[in-house]
Image (cartoon, rainbow, N blue to C red):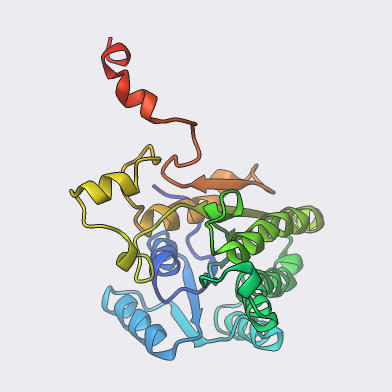
Amino acid sequence: MDLKMAGHVAVVCGGSTGIGFATALTFLKEGCSVAICSRSEAKLEKAYKELMDLGYSNVYAESVDMTDEKSVYAFADHVAEKFGTIHYWVNVVGGSMPRALNQASSEDFDRAVAMNFKSAFFGCNAAAKYMKKQCYGAIVNVTSMAHWRPAAGRTLYGANKAALVQLTKGFAAELSPFHIRVNSVSPGLVMSEMSRPFVPEEGTEEFRKFFKEYLIKRPGEAREIGEPIVLLCSPAFGFTTATDIKADGGVDAVYELQWVYENLDILSQ
């Protein structure tokens, strides 16, 4: 599918693994030049090499601490110096740490805010600096199903992702005079390095129980989030802004899903 993005410049913050890497690869397949960043130099180097081995030379990679405002702005400047400008910017950076609220320290709170909220705030502003000049651009913030369905013991993560959805709408409003669209994508459970140890082996009873509330009975793949992100950035979604797209396998669809399976004889008629 030609999304008419060839020749444009995309930035993926948190682009070295998982959803971020899948997003970067999809942008490249659409003919974009792509800049990726990550705090981990080792993961960044591995991702860069993999993309180069796939035949993509229009890639820029830089180690960046997205929780540091000056570093984020410097990264945006480096991308613009390399490729001329910035058309698309995706904020994937985030992280969840198990912690009961009454056990969370001030440092825990600040870390959760920095990783899941401030990083995107800095990213949106850095991107807007260049998008305003050309009166064109699209930004996507990656949130989580946790913003409407927080996991027990991980409320700080969900609360910050909920705040990010509101921030997305605010940026969408304030950047609309400059023809910049801002949206978010909320993934459900996606198979990754972080989630793999917690997902039961496929085909087992534990696996079935784990995904009993999902309409799609499995974890998502990174590309199944990366591709919608790129689509949101593309002209195909040119009339869409201030919107949160759920890519959650239908986990939030209905109450008492078991009824469906108890009445398959009726539903199959």
Q: Position of residue 44 (x, y in %)?
A: 41, 84
Q: Nearer the viewer, residue 195 or 91?
A: 195
Identity of the residue drawn at 38% across and 89% down: 42
Report the side of 212 relative to 133 (left or right). left
Q: Residue furthest front?
A: 102
Q: Residue furthest top?
A: 269
Residue 251's place in the image compared with 258, above or below, is: below
Q: Position of residue 191 (x, y in %)?
A: 34, 61
Residue 69's place in the image compared with 249, above or below, is: below
- Looking at the rendered image, the quarter that the C terminus falls into is top left
Report the side of 57 relative to 173 (left or right). left
Q: How many marks?
A: 0
Report the side of 105 relative to 153 (left or right). right
Q: Position of residue 57 (x, y in %)?
A: 37, 79
Is residue 51 visible in this depiction of the protein?
A: yes
Q: Position of residue 223 (x, y in %)?
A: 37, 57
Q: Nearer the viewer, residue 185 or 133?
A: 185
Q: Nearer the viewer, residue 151 or 122?
A: 151
Q: Nearer the viewer, residue 51 or 56?
A: 51
Identity of the residue drawn at 66% across and 56% down: 162
Figure quadrant of residue 157: bottom right
